[in-house]
Image: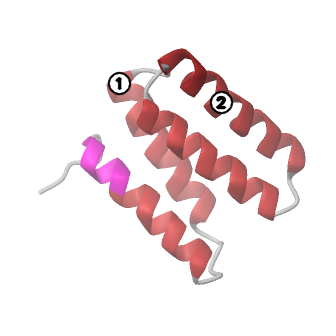
Amino acid sequence: MLGSKDPFYAGVLNNLALLYVQMDQTDKVEDYLKRSAEVYKTRFGDQNPNYAKVLNDLGNFYRAQGRFAEAEENLTKALNIRGTLH
């Protein structure tokens, strides 16, 4: 059974959030993405590609919601992390 601190659990949370976006049921999306990001950050640190992907997904969610300042913050963080990995 997956624990709430397991990276596979974080991946499930991220995918579930993206499914809810596609289903236009956005009330849980932000929470799932934040929880997923926290697991990755706690487990692997803040320079991890999985963490960057969740930040990117969160940024795109905020952008779609018209929350542009939060979108820019998360998308910029994701870009910076990815830039240091290459």
Across and down, in percent, residue 31 comes to 57, 56
Q: Does residue 50 lie above or below 80 as drawn? A: below
Identified at 62% across, 44% down, the residue is 56
Start and end of the magenta stretch?
Answer: 6-11
Q: Residues within 10 Å of mark 2 (few under 14, many from 20)?
A: some
The quadrant holding residue 49 is: top left
Looking at marks 1 and 2 on the same chain, the residue that comes earlier in the sequence is marked by 1
> How was this image coloured?
secondary structure
Residue 43 part of the magenta segment: no
Residue assigned mark 1: 44
Across and down, in percent, residue 20 comes to 55, 75
Residue assigned mark 2: 79
Across and down, in percent, residue 2 comes to 18, 53
Q: Residue furthest top?
A: 84
Q: Residues within 10 Å of mark 1 (few under 14, many from 20)?
A: some
- Main secondary-structure element of the magenta-colored stretch: helix
